[in-house]
Image (tube, helix red, strand yellow):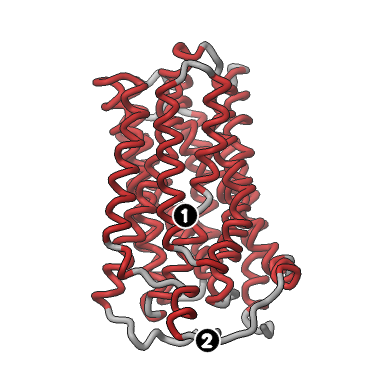
Amino acid sequence: MSTLPSSTAGRDMRVLTLVSTGHFMSHYSQLILPALFPLMTDMYSVGYAALGLIVTLINASGAVAQIPVGFLVDRIGAKNLLVAGLLVKTLAIGAMAMTDSYSMLLVLAVVAGFGHSVFHPADYAILMSSIDESRIGRAFSVHTASGNAGSAIAPLLILMIAAQWGVKGALLSIALFGVLTALALVLQSGIIQDHVGAKKKKGTPSHKSSSVIEDLKMLARPNILILYLFFFITAMITVGVNSFTVTGLNVAHDLALPVAGTALTTFLVGGLLGVLVGGYLADKTDRHDMVAAVSFLLCAGLLFLIGFYNLPLFALMSAYALLGVLLGLIKPARDMMVRAVTDKRDAGKMFGFMSNGHFLGAAAVPVLLGWVVDQGQVRWVFWLGAIFCLLALFSLATTTAGAKNAKTDPE
């Protein structure tokens, strides 16, 4: 990949800010439902496993749509798809406030997942085509950090909104925020460049378009499938912590909901810091395997500790902050591994494929952990997270080997 000749730090920052704003909203809207679970059980007269199914369906439908959307991004461009996805997702969640039917919640969850599927393929296609490669590691980290910021704010803010205006008011606020964000993206979209737009502007393609069969064969290469496994397992860890920290601390350790929500926010703020530090490391070192291995081992220890002991409040918050930092360090390295094996023209489909792995891992967790809670084994919410961290070490070892080998593979 060559450095973009027209790229400047100022323009890069404007593009990154705009794309990251949409990413912020995608994560904010993704995490509000788990935070509302304790309030939704009475409203809909269902258990935690049934509520977990809502999150599972959002992730599952997003997973199904990721690869087709990735192909579509590489065919028609990312800008309009990004705005459309944001509106579909946030309006679907807002519409949940209009129904008292659990079945309709499941339908809207599927629609919201289709909208959510757009963000990663579109965002990464824009970033890889717009940002100078000397800053790409930090750009990836800022983009990821913006998502973490949305996640960090969501539990505390949505519970405050729910306390003032109820669960339905909290859900409607998502639709309002989504429309405002989409409007900002439309008004500023002139500065966004993606690989399809660049090709059309030049008038002639720089390469022969590949067939769908050739693209699928590319995605089926062993080193790509290894990266896919890495995304799958790391999603099980992060989504498990995101979805059931509030419930786990509330039920297992008898912490009040605002305190449990603060612990989750502390974890997510730590994740934001870890992602930013990880972006700097991603531009300075190629030892992503060592950083991730140490992080996973320490995370496993922390989750076992939280599950076994009722820690003092300061110790608990510190543990969650460190847990967030450690998991955050891994994300920029993960994105750089994918970039190392991706041509710009394939950015949509490649990141769509990896996000499919992320969504499938995310879809596998909420119902499992909800069932564990319903069985009265709440501490296993934390212990299973620790076990997933240990399992991730295997995928990390094979991912690192696959990524290094991929750098020498001819395209």
Q: Residues under labels 2 and 1: Cα distance? A: 27 Å
Q: Residue at x 48, y 34 (%)?
A: 243
Does residue 95 appear in this view? yes
Of tags 2 and 1, the one toward the viewer is 2
With respect to residue 208, does 353 lie above or below? Answer: above
Question: In which quadrant of the rendered view does residue 259 lie?
Answer: top left
- Per the image, label 2 sits on a secondary structure element best described as loop
Image location (x, y in percent) of residue 26: 41, 47
| Residue that label 2 marks | 204
- Disc 1 crowd, CA 10 A, few/some/many (<14, 14-19, 20+): many
Q: Residue at x 68, y 63 (%)?
A: 226
Which residue in the protein does label 1 denote? 119
Disc marking residue 387: none
Asked if 175 appears above or below 334 in the picture, the reply is: above
Residue in front for this viewpoint, 160 or 387: 160
Q: Locate residue 267, reporting x and y percent.
A: 38, 42
- Residue 30: x and y in percent read 44, 40
Neighbor class of circle 2 (other Cα within 10 Å; few <14, some 14-19, many 20+) is few
- Identify the residue shown where x is 55% and y is 59%: 293
Name the element at disc 1: helix
Q: Is 358 displayed left or right of 147 in the figure?
A: right
Q: How many marks can you see?
A: 2
Q: Which residue is drawn at 62% across and 68% down?
A: 400
| The residue positioned farthest toward the front in the image shown | 203
Disc 2 to disc 1: CB gap under 8 Å: no
In the foreground, 32 or 92: 92
Q: Residue 369: where, in percent of width, then height? A: 59, 30
